[in-house]
């Protein structure tokens, strides 16, 4: 499966962005989907994940709970990350990825097998 992420950009603190991740080659129904981010000089970290068979089953990093929402459109084979109330510490390259492991491990970077190219989000103060 190939992943294409888009939607990043420059936004002021308190603003919003919506990231998109479109898959080709295979359907999302085969995978749990995750969003991760990597800030300069830091390790890649988990942001959010959505279950492949139950869109209501989602997970979030504590740092984004209540501000970010992951969702999907199966007809478009696309997963979204709606980011509200953005903060300067949200600045990073955001990546989407897929995994077929148990959803309980969906927060673990090493469990993901295919990654998109990343999209840069910059939040100014």
Image (cartoon, rainbow, N blue to C red):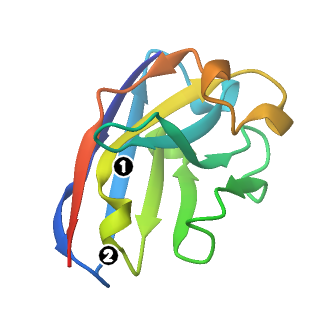
**Left or right side of 108 for 9:** left
Other residues around mark 2 within 10 Å, as few (<14) / some (14–19) / many (≥20):
some
Q: Position of residue 124 (x, y in %)?
A: 18, 72
**For residue 39, which quarter of the picture?**
top left
Q: Residue at x 78, y 22 (%)?
A: 101
Q: Secondary structure at mark 1?
A: strand
Nearest the eye: 18 or 36? 36
| Residue in front for this viewpoint, 84 or 54 | 84
Residue at 51% x, 44% y: name it: 75
> Which residue in the protein does label 2 denote?
16
| SS of the residue under disc 2 | loop
Could you say where residue 55 lies in the image, as x and y percent from the top left? 72, 53
Q: Residues within 10 Å of mark 1 (few under 14, many from 20)?
A: many
Q: Is residue 118 left or right of residue 113?
A: left
Location of mark 1 (residue): 20
Q: Quadrant of residue 95?
A: top left
Q: How many marks?
A: 2
The extreme bottom residue here reads: 14
Please say if 86 is above or below 27: below
Residue 43 versus residue 83 in the image, above or below: above
Closer to viewer: mark 1 or mark 2: 2
Image location of residue 114, percent across then percent down: 49, 17
| Label 1, label 2: how far apart the Cα atoms are | 13 Å
Pick whichever, 3 or 91, lies toward us. Answer: 91
Task: Report whether 43 appears left or right of 52.
Answer: left
The residue nearer to you, when weighing 43 against 14, is: 43
Circle 1/circle 2 CB separation < 8 Å? no
């Amino acid at each position: 499966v190939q992943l294409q992420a888009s939607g990043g950009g420059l936004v002021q603190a308190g603003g919003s962005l919506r990231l998109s991740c479109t898959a080709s080659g295979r359907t999302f129904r085969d995978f749990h989907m995750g969003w991760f981010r990597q800030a300069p000089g830091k390790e890649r970290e988990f942001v959010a994940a959505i279950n492949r068979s139950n869109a209501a089953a989602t997970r979030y990093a504590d740092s984004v709970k209540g501000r970010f929402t992951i969702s999907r459109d199966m007809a478009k084979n696309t997963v979204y990350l709606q980011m509200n109330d953005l903060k300067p510490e949200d600045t990073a390259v955001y990546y989407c990825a897929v995994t077929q492991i148990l959803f309980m491990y969906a927060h673990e970077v090493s469990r993901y097998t295919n990654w998109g190219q990343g999209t840069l989000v910059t939040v100014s103060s």
